[in-house]
Amino acid sequence: MTKTAAMLVIGDEILSGRTQDTNSNYVARQLTGLGIDLKEVRVVGDDETEIVAALNALRARYDFIFTTGGIGPTHDDITADAVAKAFGVGIGYHPDAYAALEARYEKGQFNDARKRMARVPDGAGLIKNSASVAPGFHIGNVFVMAGVPMVMRAMMETILPQLPQGVPVTSVTVSAALPEGALAEGLAAIQKAYPETVIGSYPWMQDGRFGAQLVARSRDAAVAEAAAKAIEAMIVNLGGKPERVTG
Amino acid sequence: MTKTAAMLVIGDEILSGRTQDTNSNYVARQLTGLGIDLKEVRVVGDDETEIVAALNALRARYDFIFTTGGIGPTHDDITADAVAKAFGVGIGYHPDAYAALEARYEKGQFNDARKRMARVPDGAGLIKNSASVAPGFHIGNVFVMAGVPMVMRAMMETILPQLPQGVPVTSVTVSAALPEGALAEGLAAIQKAYPETVIGSYPWMQDGRFGAQLVARSRDAAVAEAAAKAIEAMIVNLGGKPERVTG
């Protein structure tokens, strides 16, 4: 059974447009590589009620939830408290996190704000990582990560080996300099003929020419390849020149 | 009363990680400029049930909803049907959209797939735009736009003058080469002293040095400025050098 996931991005700076979220895309690509289906992303602000509601909606529905943002030392970092509230548990210093942070700072510098980074919901495990002494944490099916992309990626590196390996989706992409409107009818027929693929069409425009990338996705690599071959044949039939796109 | 908004990004390609969504950030910045608060973003796949559920949840809760993606001519473009279903209305060709599209194509080229782009829910109005003959549409409090960023932006240009102008948030940013852990206590006190601002802290790292951008946001420009001055005084007190960041 394919595992599902959702992502919860936490931060006013995303919603104001100050910051372009790139963490979702990174997590999406990692999960796709593992064979886990990312089904939904939500972005909410630094608001406890919103975080709790979104987290509870998502964790009831998907196998794994990944959150980013709000676990630093400042007053606007409220994710740990919100997660504890969502799970209905207490919150306190995790001894390992506390010890690691205490060791990182010089005497007198390990102030209350920095101690906040050792606070995790009761029962949570730590997500240690190579980028920061301050850990993420996991509780139930929820993985709580930093918002800073470099730190988030280091935390994902810790998490990924713990996730179940599914069958990754094979994705075969064919590009043609034909407009979507000319491709659509044939493409719909191919989608019907290959129900075990999901075929997507993504238009492009370059130097005044129109085209589309046609993507056949399936957990059965042979089926994706067969659908891609059918797409290539259709493009040739329409007088176009199909091109495989890799990467 | 400040108007609120949500964004619904529709597309498998975002969830698979194939495409980095940048439309949300663009819409966020446009709305922030207008004084409308973007409160939530959701990303769902090309799945009618998911689109309908998300749209109905969001449109009941926020003043305006902006969707992107799924309004092209191919079989995976199902947004118009999903929106009609969410509103419980029928769907058919909009005569203006049909006429505009028909005029765009040469005789015999205006096929069923292209006609699909003229289909809008009953009662919807068109979002004409400078980038594409195929329009977006609006129904109730929902604005339905293309996923291709250039076309989405052209549609936003049509929409923006129709939206109510609120009081934009003034955002004052002060940067300091001090770690968040050193700033946190003072920052929390300033947040308390200026309850009409929302103060955010965004860490940075450069050449091995740590720092943070501290952002005071308020609809009262004088309050944001006063909070920023308090932040600057705190930074000086800590032996740092505050720098205003613009743009």
Image (cartoon, coloured by chain):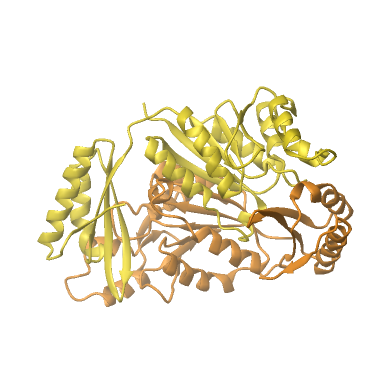
Chain colours: A yellow, B orange
Residue under the point 19% across and 49% down: A228
Which residue is painted at 19% across and 46% down in the image?
A: A227
From the viewer's side, name the closer residue of B49 and A125: A125
Q: Please state if B40 lies on the left or on the right of A214 as rendered.
A: right
Q: Is residue B133 left or right of residue A225?
A: right
Q: Provide residue A113's location: percent of width, then percent of height.
A: 79, 41
Quarter of the figure that contains the N terminus of chain A:
top left
Residue at image coords 45%, 44%: A28
Question: Which one is nearer the viewer's eye here, B220 or B174?
Answer: B174
**Nearer to the camera, A73 or B157:** A73
Residue B53 visible to the viewer: no
Based on the displayed image, in which of its 4 quarters is residue A226 positioned?
A: top left
Res. A173 visible in picture: yes
Please determine whether, in this image, residue B23 is positioned above or below residue A97: below
Q: In the rendered view, does B231 fall on the left or right side of B94?
A: right
Image location (x, y in percent) of residue B157: 52, 73
Could you say which quadrant of the image residue A78 lies in? Answer: top right
B143, above or below B54, in the image: below
Q: Position of residue A23 (x, y in %)?
A: 53, 48
Q: Residue at x 73, y 54 (%)?
A: B200
> Could you say where residue A206 lies in the image, as x and y percent from the top left?
31, 71
Looking at the image, residue A140 lies above or below residue A108 = above
Question: How many numbered marks have been drawn onto this rendered protein structure?
Answer: 0
Outermost top residue: A123
